[in-house]
Image (cartoon, grey):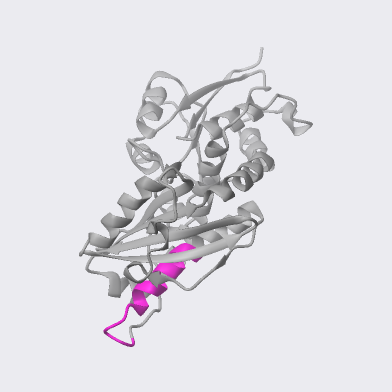
Amino acid sequence: MLHNYNILICDDSPLVHRTMTRYLSAIDNVVLHYALNGKEGLECLRHHNIDLLFLDLTMPVMDGYTLLESLPVNEYGTEVVVLSADVQKQAKARCKALGVERFMSKPFESCDLFENLNRLGITSPLQQKVTSPREESSYIEVFREVANVALGRGAAVISDHLGEFITMPLPVVATTEASSLAMTLNELRDNENAIAISQRFVGGGIYGEALVRLHGKDIAVFGERLGFSQVDEHTNEVVIDIANLMVSSFLGALTEHMNIPFSVRQPIVLEEYMHWNDNTKSAATVYSTIEYGYRAESLDLDCDVLFLMDSSSTPVIKKIMETLH
């Protein structure tokens, strides 16, 4: 009689749940459990003897680090494999400090999954061929996961430059009407405590603009650590350089994942360039948007980024997401 293995997938992405299920459901002696955040994951661990936990790090309600800090919840020996888009060296070091040695980066390779299964003695027919049908996912779901992976790559680039841990954001991927964006732009423009930068980009039929808002007393310190210096006190060289790094690191990772090279224009302070607030845009025009924020733990600095892609880009994005699913 085969021993049943309980596997818990703790991740806030329904797409990850479906992908992992597609790989694991064909194994006869595996029982799958699911959690959308660390709090749900802990509850599952309390009520079930989980043999293997695949754990995301960046989740709402309770993140993966907090879950790891709360272990053990019982005497059962649960194996933990971190499955995350956060590929910073500091992220892996933190996981090691919390007792986790196994790390799978998103998007993961099937061989990495098989290796972790085999360590528990779980043999998989999927090593021959995946035959289970795929469930349909909306392009927004896929795009959100792509953005999440790109953010992880971008955070690693910034962390390497900065020399410290960057708090990974949860990307908000959505569609937004021009009327709502106008309100956001007005808020940015009227906020005296923040500096906003605009940078246009294009690639593979996708046209858009990135808005970067910096707020906090350590902007100059952040710039110095990144190797940027201020030449003229009356200009915003450091701010523009920081914004350029935030945008280029994300787009560079997006290029790697989507196989589309992006080119960017020189960043401009938003007060000097209000392209997205002109009157030629219909209030009903819909944009695809990606919104996120990076935080450096030891510095007083908030960096919020909003990527806007115009309506003509949406069919291109949909087509690319269909090929990636």
**Residue 79 shows in the view:** yes
Residue closest to the eye, 29 or 126:
126
Residue at horizontal 62 percent and vertical 28 percent from the top: 136
Residue 56: x, y in percent?
Answer: 46, 40
User: Residue 213 occupies which quadrant of the picture?
Assistant: bottom left
Q: Decide which of 192, 253 is in the foreground and name it.
A: 192
Q: Position of residue 67 (x, y in %)?
A: 36, 37
* Quadrant holding the N terminus: top right
In the displayed structure, 144 sits above or below 292; it is above
Residue 220 image offset from top left, x and y in percent: 29, 75
Q: Residue at x 71, y 24 (%)?
A: 132
The residue nearer to you, when weighing 297 against 125, is: 297
Range covered by the magenta-colored residues: 231-248
Q: How many marks?
A: 0
Q: Main secondary structure of the magenta part?
A: helix
Q: Closest to the observer: 253 or 136? A: 136
Residue 174 placement (x, y as % from top left): 45, 41
Is residue 168 visible in the rendered image? The answer is: no
Determine the residue positioned at 44% across, 52% down.
281
Q: Does 67 lie within the magenta span?
A: no
Residue 32 is drawn in which quadrant?
Answer: top right
213 horizontally vs 118: left or right: left
For the point 39% across and 18% down, the residue is 47
In this rendering, position of residue 210 left or right of residue 293: right
Picture quadrant where residue 3 is located? top right
Q: Tell whether 324 sits left or right of 211.
A: right
Residue sitting at the far right? 128
